[in-house]
Amino acid sequence: MFQKIGNIKICIEKDYEAMSLRAADIFADCVAQNSNGAYGFATGSTPVGMYKALVEKYKNGKLDFSQITTFNLDEYYPIKGDHDQSYRYFMEQNLFNHVNLDKSKINLLNGQAEDTILECKAYDHKIGIAGGITLQILGIGTNGHIGFNEPNDYFSGKTGIVDLTENTINDNARFFESRAQVPCQALSMGIGSIMSAKEILLLAAGANKSKIIADMLLGRVMPQVPASILQFHQHVTVVLDTPAAEDIRLMLGYQ
Ligand code: F6R
C-alpha cells in the first residue's frame, strides 16, 4: 500500500475520506510514540477531513492531545484572529475547540503583529525551545507552495513575511466574499523551518493537484516548485486520493 519514490513514501487512497483516515492514523501513531512532541499544523480544505478524524479519535479515547505542543504553518497578514478566514479561527473550529489541547501549548503566528520581524523571530525561537517539530502536516498549493512559500528563485529559510502570488490569491478567493478581500501577504514558516521537522506528512486531494504532485515527486528540485525540496528530506510521507495521484500513476505505471 505504501510505495517509494526516492526517499518519499507514497500512499494512494481511493478517495478523500480514506486519505483523511490514513493521515489521521499516521498522526495518531506519531503522538502515541511522542506524546509530548511538537506538531505542525496546516489549514486549507485538504486537512479538514483529517482533523475531523482526529477529533473522532479523541472522543473515542484513542488520542490524547494533552501533552503536545502545536505550531501552525502560516497566517494571512494582516487579518484579525477572529476573522472567519483567519487560520486561528480555522484551527479553533476544526480542531482546537474539540480536543484536550493545553491552550498554553498552542502557537499561531499573529496576523495583527505590529512588528512582523520580531513576531517571526520569536516564533522560530519557540519552535527551538520546543525541541523542533516532531511531525509537520502539509498541504500543497497548485503552484507547489508549501506553507505560504511561493515559487521563487531561491528557497526561503526561516519564518518570515511573504507576498502571495496571483495564483494563490485566485485559489483562495473561494473562501472569501470576494477576491479583493484576500490578504496579499502572509506570515509563514520558511522552507528551512519546514525541512527541520523530523517527519513530514503531506496530503493532497483532487485532480487539480495531480500535476503539481508529479512535479514535486518526479521533477527537478528547484525553488520554482517549492515542495520539490521535500525530495531531500529523509522522512516524508505523501498521502493522496486517487485523482491527485493520476499523473504519477500514468508516469510510473502504478495500478
Ligand atoms: C495552509 C497552507 C497552504 C495550503 C495550500 C493548499 O496552512 O499552508 O500551503 O496547504 O494552499 O490548500 P488547500 O488544501 O485549500 O488546497
Image (cartoon, grey):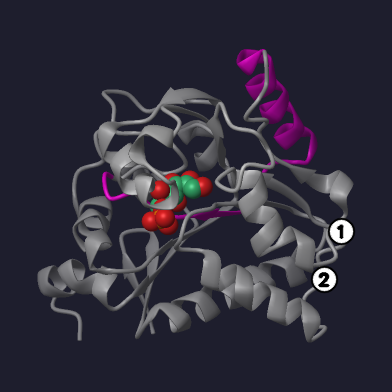
Q: Residue furthest front?
A: 177
Query: Can you give x and y, in whole percent of width and height, for residue 74 in the image?
Result: 56, 39
Where is the C terminus found, in terms of image quarters?
bottom left
Disc 1 on helix, strand or loop? Answer: loop
Q: Determine if the magenta segment contains residue 116.
A: yes
Within 10 Å of disc 2 (Cα), the crowding (few <14, some 14-19, many 20+) is some
Q: Label 1 belongs to which residue? A: 67
At horizontal 50% and vertical 31% (from top left) the residue drawn is: 190
User: Identity of the amino acid at label 2?
Assistant: Asp
Query: Can residue 134 be seen here?
Result: no
Q: Which mark is residue 87?
A: none
Is 84 drawn above or below residue 7 in the view shown?
above
The quarter of the picture where the N terminus appears is: bottom left
Range of the magenta residues?
115-143
What whole-number distance in Å separates the C-alpha atoms at marks 2 and 1? 8 Å
Residue 61 vs 107, above or below: the answer is below
